[in-house]
Image (cartoon, rainbow, N blue to C red):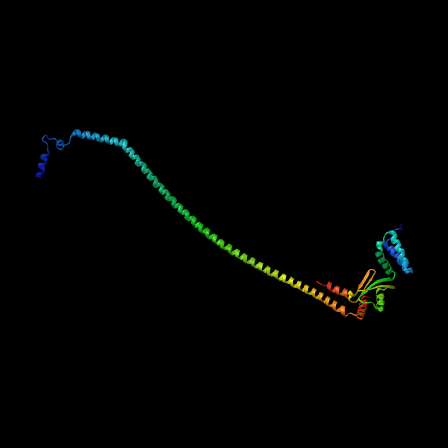
Amino acid sequence: MNLLTQFAQAAEPASGDVFAALGIDWMMLIFQTIAFVILVWLLGKFVYPILMKTVDARQAEIEAGSKAAAEAEKQATEAKQAVDKLMQQARRDATDIVTTAKEEASAAIEAAEAKSKTRAERIVADAHVQIEKDIVAAKKALHNETLELVALATEKVVGKTVTAKVDDAVIAAAVKGAK
Amino acid sequence: MAVRLSRRKMAAYVADKLVAGTPVSEALREVAAYLQDSGRTREQQLLVRDIEAEMADRGVVVADVASAHPLDASITDQIKAMTGAKSLQLRQSVDESLLGGIRVDIPGKRFDGTIRHKLNALRAKQL
């Protein structure tokens, strides 16, 4: 307490002016205040607008980017949903195609089998017909050859064995048969 | 130039003359002269055939008989009976290729009883 009183007595100027005791120069303070105001005015007039404009532009860009990002994300989500939908549709289509292909393949195989069977049956039938024809032709050939052989053999035998007497009997029988 | 007669009329004329007893040589000479005069000598074979046909109609048959061996006399009578002719004239020929039997050609008809014919008929049955 005693120390504080001494300090206050020491700081109090002799003239009794507190500001002078504190070392404050009124003129200088006013001058500095005016300079500060002018500085603030200049900054507010020429610098701040540019900075604010830049900041606003930057903020707008950021907001636009953010909006674009959100839009892009939305579009990506939609695209993903569309892709998923398309993929599902594609899977269904693929499944349908595979099923249809299997059915068509089965039908084609069955048709081919039926066709092969029919063709085989026709070939067998044709073969039977051809065999029958061959048999008939062979029988005809055998019949004809037999007739020819019989005729030739008869010709040979008769040519040597028919005497005039036998011939007279043959003639008599022929004439008798012609009456 | 002579009047053109049909071959049938000529044949009937000659047949009538032959049946009436005109010698064959005389009738043939007359026909030959006519054919020569009318330029129809190419028809002589056909005319002979027609004359034979006309003769057959009048009961006189000319038959061509072919056989593998010479015919016995009894066969001739059988042929005559077979043809039903009042008079039968045979032109016989021997053809060994007939093998046996007899073939008789009379106008408008043929009887073939040869073994050759039967063999040919057998061959004709080939399928």
The picture places residue A156, in percent across and down from the top left corner, at 74, 68
Q: Residue at x 40, y 45 (%)?
A: A79
The picture places residue B69, in percent across and down from the top left corner, at 81, 67
Toward the right, the furthest residue is B21
Q: Answer with the quarter of the image where residue A151 lies.
A: bottom right
Q: Answer with the quarter of the image where residue A26 lies.
A: top left
Q: Answer with the quarter of the image where residue B32 lies.
A: bottom right
The picture places residue B50, in percent across and down from the top left corner, at 85, 57
A8 lies above or below B51:
above
B98 lies above or below A35:
below
Q: Nearer the viewer, residue B36 or B5?
A: B36
Q: Nearer the viewer, residue A109 or B50?
A: B50
- Label count reads 0
Residue A154 left/right relative to B106: left
B44 lies above or below A11:
below
Q: Nearer the viewer, residue A130 or B65?
A: B65
The picture places residue A80, in percent across and down from the top left corner, at 39, 47
Where, quadrant-wise, is the C terminus of chain B in this rendering?
bottom right
